[in-house]
Image: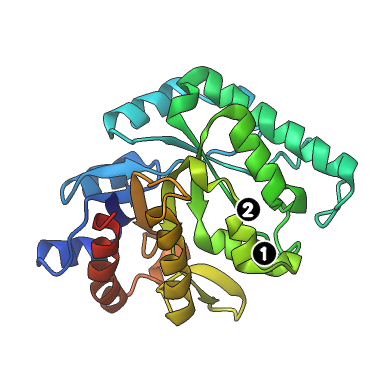
Amino acid sequence: MQFAINYSPQAAELLARGQISVDRFKCPPWPDLLAEARAHAPVYVHFDLRADPVANRMLDFGSIARLYTDTHTPYLNLHLIPSRQALPAMAHDTTDPRDIKAVTDALLTGVWLVVEEFGVENVILENLPYYGGRYPDELRPAVEADVIRRIVEETGCGFLLDISHGRLAARHMGLDERDYLARLPGARLRELHITGIGLDQEGLVCDHLGLGEEDWLFLTWTLDRIRSGEWATPEIMAFEYGGIGPLFEWRSDAAVIAAQVPRLAELAHSL
């Protein structure tokens, strides 16, 4: 399994000094940043695409395909976020079976629009966090484990498991975090994202932090399921720490990267 980390100037400098080793830098679909990162290591793109049936009918698939192919990105990722434009009046915390069906149908339509362009074998679907309505795009049905599993299995796509996203979703739905994660479609696992969970600069719960003790325990639990064969071995394990711009600069500490990347890379390469 390859190991990747979000591209950041701090990670690039540590790599140049020989203090860390990575197989790839994980980058947003920004050509200038990709060119900068490629000067240091191979890259791959984490696209900001959603399983949104409204937006996906207007995508420039040609531009996406060129970026995908040029960077040798293993899979085209979609975030399992439905279109709020199509479901404007739905309560974020609904558990009504009719709403669950509406969200599931919307997500399936959004996925199929991309699969028709890129092929099912090239598309992976990522689980999202849920903060109980903190953000306008949140809809609880989209993070229900049964919904995620059905969409992955019905479409035949691969699964991108973000451990912290799953933990946050379970936490805000009042579910046991391990029980929730265990119900996700690990047999279709193709990529794994890891981060720490903590508080942001405003004191709100967030992810994309360095790993604390509990975060390491969840990673160990996840890797044990992969080693046992219960879950598939993903192609890439990505540490989503660090980055560019105000969203990530405050959580791009070179000391965290230097301390945690060697251990994480060793774990990834052991599988």
The percent coordinates of residue 201 (x first, y second) are 53, 78
Find disc 1 in the rendering and name its residue.
Answer: 170
Residue 235 lies, with reference to residue 7, above or below; the image says above
Amino acid type assigned to the residue bearing label 1 in the image = Ala
The residue nearer to you, when weighing 208 against 151, is 151
The residue nearer to you, when weighing 175 against 128, is 175
Residue at image location 28% in from the left, 33% down from the top: 72
- Which class describes the residues within 10 Å of circle 2: few (<14), some (14-19), or many (20+)? few
Residue 253 is drawn in which quadrant? bottom left
Find disc 2 in the rendering and name its residue.
Answer: 183
Q: Is residue 179 left or right of residue 162?
A: right
Q: Is residue 238 visible?
A: yes
- Which class describes the residues within 10 Å of circle 1: few (<14), some (14-19), or many (20+)? many
Distance of mark 2 from mark 1, alpha carbons?
Answer: 11 Å
Residue at image location 29% in from the left, 49% down from the top: 1
Give the number of the disc on residue 203. Answer: none
Q: Is residue 144 left or right of residue 207?
A: right
Query: Total label count?
Result: 2
The percent coordinates of residue 271 (x first, y second) are 29, 54
Q: Earlier in the sequence, mark 2 or mark 1?
A: 1
Residue at image location 55% in from the left, 25% down from the top: 114
The percent coordinates of residue 32 (x first, y second) are 29, 43
Q: Is residue 53 visible?
A: no
Amino acid type assigned to the residue bearing label 2 in the image = Arg
The percent coordinates of residue 133 (x first, y second) are 76, 61
Residue at image location 58% in from the left, 50% down from the top: 127
Q: Secondary structure at mark 1?
A: helix
Residue 258 is drawn in which quadrant? bottom left
- Are circles 2 and 1 on residues that touch, CB within 8 Å? no
